[in-house]
Amino acid sequence: VVIFRTLGLEQIERIVEIQLSSLRARLAERKITLELSSAAKELVAREGFDPVYGARPLRRTIQKEIVQPLAMRLLRNEFHDGEHILIDVAPGGVLEFKKASAPVAV
């Protein structure tokens, strides 16, 4: 018998970052950078985690809550090449996509 520990919020947030790496790589081709606030990362982690299935639904949640809305905004020219996009949580608990100044490299 193999017993698995339930993933904590911190581990799920790390999985969110891993899942977003491929999206960031595609955006980098257009010199677009993407950043999630800690609140946005937590929201996606909570919505994408299922006590029974663990982090398996996370990919669908990221697709539905980040990839598809971002693609529509790019198609509508709300964001342009070379910009930095910040995803945060708006009042009402929905994700908000906004232009931001690029993060400072440390």
Image (cartoon, helix red, strand yellow):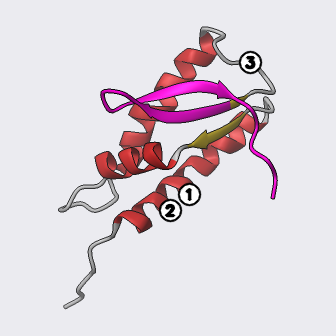
Q: Residue at x 33, y 49 (%)?
A: 48
Q: Residue at x 50, y 62 (%)?
A: 14
Q: Secondary structure at mark 2?
A: helix
Mark 1 burial class by Cα count in 10 Å: few <14, some 14-19, many 20+: few
Q: Residue furthest top?
A: 76
Asked if residue 4 is positioned above or below residue 18 in the image, the reply reads below
Mark 2 burial class by Cα count in 10 Å: few <14, some 14-19, many 20+: few
Asked if residue 29 is positioned above or below residue 48 in the image, the reply reads above
Q: Amino acid at mark 3?
A: His
Quarter in which the N terminus is drawn: bottom left
Reply yes or no: does residue 91 show up in magenta. yes
Q: Which residues are magenta?
A: 85-106
Residue 103 percent location from the top left of the image: 74, 44
- Per the model, the C-alpha gap separating discs 3 and 2 is 28 Å
Q: Amino acid at mark 2?
A: Arg
**Residue located beneath label 1 in the image:** 18
Mark 3 or mark 1, which is nearer the start of the sequence?
1
Answer with left or right where residue 84 lies relative to residue 66: right
Answer with left or right where residue 106 lies relative to residue 33: right
- Per the model, the C-alpha gap separating discs 1 and 2 is 6 Å
Circle 1 or circle 3, nearest the eye: 3
**Residue located beneath label 3 in the image:** 80
Q: How many marks?
A: 3
Q: Residue at x 62, y 47 (%)?
A: 22
> Toward which corner of the image does residue 73 lie, by quadrant?
top right
